[in-house]
Image: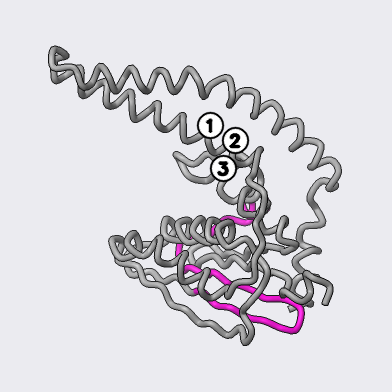
Amino acid sequence: MAEYWALYAKKLSSKPPVNQRVNRLAALGQVSANIAHEIRNPLGSISLNLQYLAQQSEVPKIYKTKLRNIESGVARIQSIVEGILEFIRPNPLDFAGVDIHRVIDSSIHFVRHEYEHSNLSIKKDYRARAPKTLIDSNQIIQVLVNLFLNAKDAMSTNGTLAVTTLSDSNTLEVHIQDDGIGISRQDLLRIFEPFFSTKRKGIGLGLAIVSRVIAEHGGQIAVESQTGIGTKFIIRLPRQGARQGG
C-alpha cells in the first residue's frame, strides 16, 4: 500500500506548487463566496414569486408551464449557489469511532434505488480485518454517495460497481471501481479542481469537496482510469490508533 502512494505522488509532481494552488483557490473562494451571498437572497425572492404565480387560477395554462420551466432554472441556479457555499464554508467535522463497513453500507442504501432503476449492480468485498476508525461518518457518507453516483453516471446498463476495503496496521483503504466509460488522461489531472466538470450540467464541486473532506480526515484520495474500461477511486484513511498517536 505504501509503495502505491509513493508512485501516485510522483504522478502529481507536474502540478503547480502547493502554495501557488492554495493562494489561487483562496482568492477564488473569496470572490465566489461574495457572489454566492449576493445572488442567494434575490434568487429566493424570485423563486417564491414564481411559485405564487404558478398557483394562481387566472394564469393561463400555457403560462403556468413556462413559469414552471423558469422555476426549474432558478432551482438549478440555487443548487449551484448552495454548492459554492458548501465548498467554501464547510461544516466542522464531528469525529467518532465507527465501522467503515457500516458507513459504506449506509452509503449504498442511499443510492441503491438509482442503481436498480438503471439496471446496475453493486458488489462488496470487505477485506479490512479491523474496520473501525475515527471519522465523521456523515461527511464520509457524503463522499461515498458522491463517488457512487458519479460511477452510476459513467456506466451503461448491466454495469457493476465494486467496493473493496483493505487494511494494514496503520491505514484503511476503500476502493471504488466501476466499469464505465473512464476518464481521459487530460481530465484525470484536473478532476479534483473546483469548478472543473466533464458533465454538461455539472458545476465541478462534487469531487473538490470529496478531496477536501478526505484531506481533513488526514487521508488521501487517488484515481486510476482508462477510457472504455473504467475508473477506480482509492480512499486511504489513517487507522484510529494512528490518528490518536497510539
Instruction: Tell me the quarter of the picture where residue 210 sits.
Output: bottom right
The image quadrant where one finds the C terminus is bottom right
How many angstroms separate mark 3 from mark 2 (CA)? 13 Å
Tag 2 residue: 85
Comes first in the chain, label 1 or label 3: 1
Gap in angstroms between the C-alphas marked 2 and 1:
6 Å
- Taking the spot 54% from the left edge, 39% from the top edge, the residue there is 83
> Is 128 situated left or right of 150 in this image?
right
Of marks 1 and 3, the one in the foreground: 1
Element under disc 1: helix
Q: Identify the disc placed on residue 204.
A: 3
Q: Is residue 79 left or right of residue 116?
A: right
Does residue 51 appear to the left or right of 209 in the view shown? left
Q: How many marks?
A: 3
Is residue 190 inside the magenta stretch?
Answer: no
Contact? badges 1 and 3 (CB < 8 Å): no
- The one nearer the camera, 66 or 103, is 103
Looking at the picture, how far across and down is residue 223, in whole percent?
63, 63
Q: Amino acid at mark 3?
A: Gly
Q: Residue 66, position in %: x, y? A: 25, 21
Residue drawn at x 29%, y 26% as measured from the top left = 69
Q: Which residues are magenta?
A: 163-189
Q: Secondary structure at mark 2?
A: helix
